[in-house]
Image (cartoon, rainbow, N blue to C red):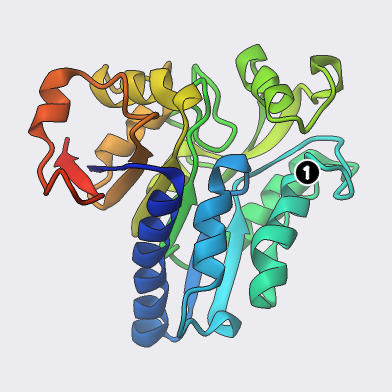
Amino acid sequence: MLLRVFSDKGSLGRAAAEQAAVAIRNAILERGQARIIAATAASQKEFLDALTQAPDIEWSNVEAFHLDEYIGLPITHPGSFRKMLMEQLIGKTGITRYHLLAGDAADPSEVVREAGKQISSAPIDIAFLGIGENGHIAFNDPPADFVIEDPYIVVNLDEACRRQQVGEAWFADISQVPKRALSMSARQILKAREILAVVPDMRKAAAVKACFEGEISPMAPASILRQHSNATVYLDVNSASLLSPALQSAMTGDSSVDGKFVRI
């Protein structure tokens, strides 16, 4: 797994989008289509803005899946990840093949079964992720299930996760944040040919340190990305600020140029 560190969210987002665009173009060239997993959150804004403006992507040949959605939340709610996906990616690119998790459906178990069939029909070329303040990927809060092979699962959200949503102003207070969600499983995320995680901001620094300097553990869900042979985590100087001096000194690259990196 590769860690890359940039001076600010803008340069981070542009660099991550460049790598993502290459992966999408190559998949379309080699296989006629690109199957992607898209993350949607405040931390993904700069990345998605840059990606949707990338040249020479045949978005009509892209099929998109998303990571997670709150149970009981309508798509019209500002905190709905379906709403964000439509606004931040699908509406800007004209993707016509996309799969939304209906969190407000009557039977969540049926939603995860159907979504699982769709995503399992062919390999995923690249997965875009964020990492939560509690270290989660998708809504796999600690302790995350690193074993279950089901592509999508119903999960309970921990308090740290729910408080993050309030902090990002999607909900007025924690009582409004749903306690359950639909989530792509950790094992399904790892099945992608390539993984790209965009993780800016100081509020993610403790999670970054726990996941990439501690043990690979369900208590630090994103630590499982270290088991993937083609994963890149994009950090800014704020989210990387708690990494040990030894790890930071191991990073290579011109200090005057963004994108210093280290393989861990």
Q: Nearer the viewer, residue 68 or 57?
A: 57
Numbered-mark total: 1
Residue 191 visible from this viewpoint? no
In the displayed structure, 193 sits above or below 207; it is below
Q: Position of residue 217 (x, y in %)?
A: 35, 19
Residue 33 visible from this viewpoint? yes
* In this rendering, position of residue 74 left or right of residue 90: right
Residue drawn at the location 45% of the way across and 25% of the way down = 202
In the displayed structure, 241 sits above or below 47; it is above
| Residue type at the position of mark 1 | Ser
Q: Residues within 10 Å of mark 1 (few under 14, many from 20)?
A: many
Q: Determine which residue is flagged by label 1.
A: 80
Residue 103 image-quadrant placement: top right
In the displayed structure, 65 sits above or below 102; it is below
Q: Position of residue 203 (x, y in %)?
A: 50, 23
* In this rendering, position of residue 254 left or right of residue 145: left
Q: Position of residue 189 (x, y in %)?
A: 45, 46
Residue drawn at the location 36% of the way across and 70% of the way down = 23
Q: Quadrant of the C terminus?
A: top left
Q: Nearer the viewer, residue 248 or 75?
A: 248
Q: Position of residue 168 (x, y in %)?
A: 68, 30
Q: Quadrant of the N terminus?
A: top left
SS type, badge 1: loop
Residue drawn at the location 72% of the way across and 33% of the way down = 181
Residue drawn at the location 26% of the way across and 18% of the way down = 215
